Amino acid sequence: MNSLISLLILSILCISKLSDSSPLKPHPLPILPLPTSQQLQWQLGSMAMFLHFGPNTFTDSEWGTGKANPSVFNPTHLNATQWVQTAKDSGFSRVILTAKHHDGFCLWPSQYTDYSVKSSPFRDGKGDVVAELAAAAAEAGIGLGLYLSPWDRHDPCYGKTLEYNEFYLSQMTELLTKYGEIKEVWLDGAKGEGEKDMEYFFDTWFSLIHQLQPGAVIFSDAGPDVRWIGDEAGHAGSTCWSLFNRTNAKIGDTDPLYSQEGDGFGQDWVPAECDVSIRPGWFWHALESPKPALQLLDIYYNSVGRNCLFLLNVPPNSSGLISEQDIKVLEEFRGLKKSIFSNNLARKALVNSSSIRGSQFGPNNVLVQGLDKYWAPEENDKTWELYLAFKNSVSFNVLEIREPIHMGQRVASFHLETHNTVSGEWERVVSSTTIGNKRLLRFPKVQSRSLKLVVDKARADPLISYLGIYMDKFSVSSANTTTKITITRTLKEEQQLHDL
C-alpha cells in the first residue's frame, strides 16, 4: 500500500476521533523557562534596523575620540521619516539609534553635558535627533530602541565610578522619560585597550530601565533580556537555544560559543540577537558600499532562520539620509524573501501525524501561522512524526519549522525524510538540532509526493506551530555547505542531545 493511501486512511481515522463530542483536552503544561511578554514580542519581530549616526559620520571614523568639535555635526537634510519608512518597507519591526556612541556626543540636548546637538549647527542648535526619530517611529507604528554607550571618551567624570554611574543614569533617565515608549535599550561592553578602569553598576541600570520602560527589553553581551550572539557577522550557531544561564555570562567577557549556542539546560530565557552592518563599517563612509542582497539573504537564514533576531545596521549618510545604494539593496533583499517565502508549498498537502493530543491540537494547525494553534502529540508518546502527502510531486529546497515558544523551547533534534516511490523506502533529506521561534534549513533540491518530519529528541512533548517548504532559486550555491553544517554535529552537541 503506497504512502498516500496510508495517509488518507490515517486522516479518516483522525477525523473520526475529532468528531467525538467528548470535552476538549487541556493544553500541555508549558516547560520552563518561558519568555516574558516583552521578549515574546521582540522575538516575533524577527528583524530590527540599527542606525549608527553621529560625529563619526562626518569625520570618517568608527570609534570617535570624544574630541571632535560639535560643529562637525551638521546633517543638512536629515529626515527621520525616511529612515523609518525604509525600515518599515523592508520588513523591520523596530529601529535602534545610537543616541550616544563611545565619543560621548549626544543626539539629544542633554542637560548633563554641552557635548550634544545643542552645541552644533544642526537646526541652529535647537535640534533633537532622538525626538525626530521617536515621532517618525510612532507615526509609522515602528518600535523605537536606543543605544547609550557605557564607554564615554569625552566626559571628564568617566573613570570615577560613583560620579560616572550617576551621570550615566541621569542621561538614561532623560532618554526613557522624554520620548514615549521605548522597546529596546541597547548596551555593550565595548572599550578600547588601555582605557580607564570603570565599574558599571549594571544591576542598578537594569532595574531603573525596567522601572521607567516596563515594555522594553535590555540587550547586552549577557542579557538580562536579550543576548549578543557573540560575533558581528550576523550568524548564530547551528544549534541555538533561547535558554541560557546568566550566571555563566558577563558583559564584555562571555564565551562566544556559549553565546552562539545558548544552553539546553539553561534556567533563564535570553534569546539571541545577531548584529551586522550592511556596510564594512558601522558608520557611513563615502568610499564604502553595501553588501549585496544575496549576502543579506544568507545572513537572514543564519540569524532569523536559527531562532534569532536579525539586527541590520543601515547608517544614515552625512546629509542625514539613508543612501540610495543601501535602499536599493534593501528593496532587492525584500524581493528575494517575498519570492521565496510567499508560497508555502506545504499548504497543498494532506497533513497527518503519528498521534494527536486532542481535537484542537490536530496536524492541520501547522499550516496556520501564529502561536495560538499548534500540533501536539498524545502524551507520553515516543513517536513524534508529521506526514505530508501531495496529489502531485513537489520540488523544494528549504524547510521552515516553528515552535510555539510561549510554551517553552522543546525540540533538541529533528530530521526530514522523503518517500522514494521506486524503492519504497524513506530517505533522509536533512537533519538539525534546535528549532525555537523559527528554523530555516537549505539543502539541494528534492522532489517527492510524501514527506515525513520526525522529532528525534525533545525536552518535553514537542509542539509544532508551523511547517513550510519552499523553493529558493537564488542561494543554491550555498545549499551544499548549509546541508553539511546542519547534518554534521559536534561531539559536544551529540552529548547534549544524549543527555536530554
Image (cartoon, rainbow, N blue to C red):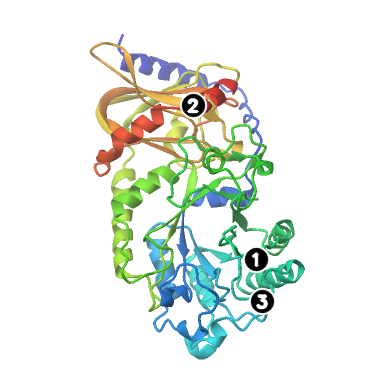
Taking 95 as reference, is 131 above or below it?
A: below
The answer to the question of whether label 1 and label 2 lie on touching residues, with beta carbons closer than 8 A, is no
Which label's residue is closer to the chain start, 3 or 1?
A: 3
Circle 2: element type: strand
Numbered circle sitting on residue 196: 1
Q: Which of 392 and 135 is in front in this view?
A: 135
| Helix, strand or loop at mark 1 | loop
Q: Which badge, 1 or 2, comes first in the chain's sequence?
A: 1
How much space separates mark 3 and mark 1, taking CA atoms?
11 Å
Quarter of the image for residue 171 reads bottom right
Q: Is residue 315 left or right of residue 331?
A: right
Q: Name the residue beneath numbered marker 3.
A: 156
Q: Quadrant of the N terminus?
A: top left
Give the residue at x 27% y 24%: 448
Q: According to the image, label 2 marks what residue?
A: 413
Q: Can residue 473 be seen in this view?
A: yes
Q: Residue 410 placed where, x, y %?
A: 56, 31
- Decide if residue 304 is in sight here: no
Give me the residue at 50% from left, 80% from top.
68
In the image, 358: left or right of 365? right
Looking at numbered disc 3 in the image, what kind of residue is underneath it? Pro
Q: Are marks 2 and 3 in contact (CB under 8 Å)?
A: no
Q: Is residue 113 above or below residue 19?
A: below
Residue type indicated by callout 1: Lys
The foreground one among 429 and 117 is: 117
